[in-house]
Image (cartoon, coloured by chain):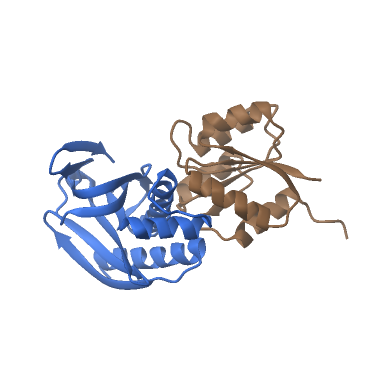
Chain colours: A blue, B brown
Amino acid sequence: MNLNEIIVKSVTGSTLQVFSTMLGVDIAAGEAAVESGMPDGNEGVVSFIGMAGSWAGTGSVSCSPAMACRICAQMLMCEAPAVNEEVLDTVAELTNMIVGSVKTDLEQHLGPLGLSIPTVVYGRNFKTKSAGTTEWIVVRFRWDDEPLTVKLCLEPKEQAAHVMFHTSSTQSCALEV
Amino acid sequence: MESNILVVDDSAAIRKILQRVLRQTGMSIHTIHEAGDGQEALVVLGAQKVDLVLSDINMPKMDGLQLLASIKASAQWRQIPVVMITTEGGETKVSEAVKLGAAGYVRKPFTADQIKEKLAGILEPALPL
């Protein structure tokens, strides 16, 4: 099994386990792919966590605002009619658990890795790019009809960059991850 | 005897889940205090009676391992059991926590039963035969 296959297996298993344990729901795992180049524009909620060690990179979870609210409502057993601080915090924690679990799996192959504090972005028509990274491993899931995407990029440390650039049509900023 | 528990996590979502899960365990709990990081936790410890600390590891300002070291270095607090709740399943952080005196750890994601099992032995020692 090569590293990409190990990552896909770990991302799939971790995501299914987090949804099953923390939300009490079984979601469906869809296709996995390797994507390169500038990703399409985002619309909704995207959460990132940096990973660092002898290998470094970023893990992310993205979904629609409606899906983010549904995750929050199910996980906290509360009403979540719109994206607010509690919804963003819940998506961040979900990402932390998924990427944290993947990190634990990968440490058997890549040595010790550290995790950053999660960062969540919510908006319309924004693009994200991890500087220096050319390939993302993408695994798509569905909760009923709503999609959720988990992505991971990981490279040996000397090749990895530590700054992620978020750009939109009107502004851009650098974000430490 | 009812216990007072301090939950330390930078995620308000996890604090809310732990509040619910701890109440669901059926253990005798009086008050569940909350703190968003290690520094806030030390303030709560200075002001409230706490019987057990349940702490995340990866937090801003003061992380869970620094909090654990501070508690174990204090003559006043060193007897308080500290259980780590973390996504850090790797041996390094867990061994460090155990070395610093953690009473145990629970990995995220967790179930109510896992929390109950871990805390029951610490808060409610087995009855004599």
Query: Viewed as shown, does residue A165 lie left or right of B21?
Result: left
In the rendered image, the vertical position of residue A141 relative to residue A75, given as above or below:
below
* Quadrant assignment, res B74: top right
Residue shown at the point (25%, 69%) measured from the top left: A32
The one nearer the camera, A162 or B48, is B48
- Residue A53: x and y in percent read 31, 45
Residue B42 position in % (x across, y down): 59, 29
For the C terminus of chain B, which image quadrant? bottom right
* Residue A51 appears anywhere in the view: no
At 25% from the left edge and 38% from the top edge, which residue is drawn?
A175
Q: Quadrant of residue B110?
A: bottom right
Q: Nearer the viewer, residue A99 or B101?
A: A99
The residue at 31%/52% (across/down) is A45
Residue B23 placement (x, y as % from top left)? 67, 53
Observer-nearest of A155 and B29: B29
Q: Is residue A169 left or right of residue A24?
A: left
Residue A75 in view of the camera: yes
Judged left or right of residue A114, residue A175 is left
In terms of image quadrants, where is residue A105?
A: bottom left
Which of the pair A71/A92 is nearer the observer? Answer: A71
The x and y percentages for residue B59 are: 45, 38
